[in-house]
Image: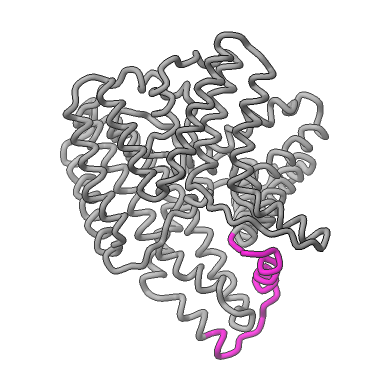
């Protein structure tokens, strides 16, 4: 187990939880969570704690000004400042490299470290300021409540993106009981298991294939790598979201679901209603609708979607692979708008078509360069060479443990949808005493077994951070 993981699981989270239970009054609880959140962020990014605090101050002051008097100029300055911070730290090197490539220049590329989670807390801050301007959220005069909203450690570095209006009441007034905390712990463990047991296992095969030489990869190996990464990114990110939702519940907060079984979708548009819901809804509310949405006809609606998908891709990272990935999904969303047949396919055919788009898209997303992405996609559909070396490399990835975890991944990303939703609903019913104690006991025993299994896997495995930490 990595030192940071050990500290978080065995010391940081239990201590903060127990102190939160012990300290009296909402002010003390909020103060504790602020201190814990800043300490948590400083553990990995000491200097950039100041950047996050500065972001909180900036948006607090902008919201206060907008609360006193609505001003488009103040709003524009606040938006520009937030996006400017994001651009400097995340995109400066990318822009310089792109200019050098296009104009054959040799401008030195600045080496600016990317603050962890900057895209997430910047978008949260932006939504707060915009909502105050729109009158959808009352301006918060207590700076420390804004700071807690922006810095809250459970979802600080990889989402879900939370709107202030969704947790405003919980910041000001909340009560937690042991039943709710237990449910949160169970949800946290299930998310941890998705990451450690499934995502990390898929990562071994995906990393091996995507780092292999061109001569090692044929159609079989390419599909192993593509499917492994497709499962890795879903269970990695949805696992973190489950952990964040669980930790939030432990401290009395209710975060909305961030994933709704996207791999069960039968169209690209349905996929995006189910995938990274907090980001999709953010772009819809703060970009797509302000651009005009679908109010000006099909053509403008399609153009607005292209803009949103371009920005969505760019949000994910400073690389053209992310931009092309976004536009790739935008293309199929646009085609579904213009070709009615794509929306009326039998569900099984629609599901196959959608997963084909998703898997190919994630190859683009995972590749370091567009050339590498094209090479891998080419092998997926035309790599019909089967040399002994290629077959040996492919079979090396298909370990028994990988096969078992891949089967579990396939089951839990789609066929288990109804079961998982029933268990979540049962969890809410537990608090009302409507679920038999035997069923409750079984679920907690399973969670305990999964926790022990995760610790064992982590103790013997290499460090494998969450994918979305870098966004």
Tell me where residue 215 appears, x and y as whole percent. 63, 83
Q: From the image, which quarter does the N terminus lie in?
A: bottom left
| Residue situated in front as seen by the camera: 175 or 81 | 81
Magenta region: which residues?
A: 366-391
Residue drawn at (59%, 44%) of the image: 271
The residue furthest top is 68
| Residue situated in front as seen by the camera: 279 or 357 | 279
- 377 in relation to 46, above or below: below
Q: Is residue 414 visible?
A: no
Q: Say left or right for 97 vs 63.
A: right
Q: Tell me how the rendering is colored.
A: one colour
Tell me where residue 362 appears, x and y as whole percent. 60, 58
Residue drawn at (59%, 22%) of the image: 130
Residue drawn at (30%, 37%) of the image: 36
- 26 in relation to 111, above or below: above
- 145 in relation to 54, above or below: above
- 245 in relation to 45, above or below: above
| Residue situated in front as seen by the camera: 31 or 105 | 105
| Residue situated in front as seen by the camera: 19 or 175 | 19
């Amino acid at each position: 187990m990595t030192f940071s993981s050990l500290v978080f699981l065995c010391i940081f989270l239990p201590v903060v939880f127990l102190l939160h239970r012990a300290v009296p009054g909402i002010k003390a609880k909020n103060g504790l969570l602020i201190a814990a959140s800043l300490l948590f962020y400083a553990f990995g990014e000491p200097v950039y704690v100041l950047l996050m605090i500065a972001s909180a101050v900036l948006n607090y002051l902008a919201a206060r000004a907008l609360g006193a008097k609505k001003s488009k100029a103040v709003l524009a300055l606040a938006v520009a400042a937030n996006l400017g911070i994001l651009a400097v730290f995340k995109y400066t090197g990318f822009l310089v490299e792109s200019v050098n490539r296009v104009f054959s220049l040799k401008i030195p590329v600045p080496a600016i470290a990317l603050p962890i989670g900057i895209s997430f807390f910047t978008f949260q801050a932006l939504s707060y300021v915009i909502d105050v301007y729109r009158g959808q959220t009352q301006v918060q005069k207590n700076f420390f409540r804004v700071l807690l909203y922006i810095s809250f450690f459970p979802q600080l570095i990889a989402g879900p993106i939370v709107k202030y209006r969704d947790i405003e009441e919980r910041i000001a007034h909340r009560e937690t009981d042991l039943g709710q905390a237990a449910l949160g712990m169970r949800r946290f463990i299930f998310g941890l298991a998705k990451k450690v047991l499934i995502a990390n296992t898929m990562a071994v095969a995906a990393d091996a294939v995507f780092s292999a030489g061109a001569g090692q990869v044929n159609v079989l190996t390419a599909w192993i790598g593509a499917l492994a990464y497709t499962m890795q990114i879903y269970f990695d990110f949805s696992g973190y979201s489950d952990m964040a939702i669980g930790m939030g519940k432990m401290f009395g907060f209710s975060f909305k679901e961030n994933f709704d079984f996207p791999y069960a979708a039968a169209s690209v548009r349905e996929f995006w209603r189910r995938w990274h819901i907090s980001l999709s809804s953010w772009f819809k509310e703060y970009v797509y609708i302000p651009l005009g949405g679908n109010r000006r006809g099909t053509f403008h609606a399609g153009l607005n979607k292209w803009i949103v998908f371009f920005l969505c891709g760019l949000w994910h990272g400073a690389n053209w692979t992310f931009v092309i990935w976004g536009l790739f999904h935008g293309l199929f969303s646009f085609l579904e708008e213009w070709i009615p047949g794509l929306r009326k396919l039998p569900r099984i055919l629609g599901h196959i078509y959608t997963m084909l788009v998703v898997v190919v898209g994630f190859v683009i997303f995972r590749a370091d360069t567009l050339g590498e992405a094209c090479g891998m996609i080419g092998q997926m559909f035309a790599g019909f060479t089967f040399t002994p070396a290629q077959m040996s490399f492919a079979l090396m990835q298909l370990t028994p443990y990988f096969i078992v975890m891949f089967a579990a991944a396939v089951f839990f990303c789609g066929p288990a949808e109804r079961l998982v939703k029933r268990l979540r609903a049962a969890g809410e019913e537990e608090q009302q005493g409507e679920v038999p104690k035997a069923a409750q006991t079984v679920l907690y025993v399973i969670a305990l077994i999964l926790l022990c299994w995760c610790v064992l896997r982590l103790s013997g495995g290499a460090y494998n951070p969450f994918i979305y930490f870098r966004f």
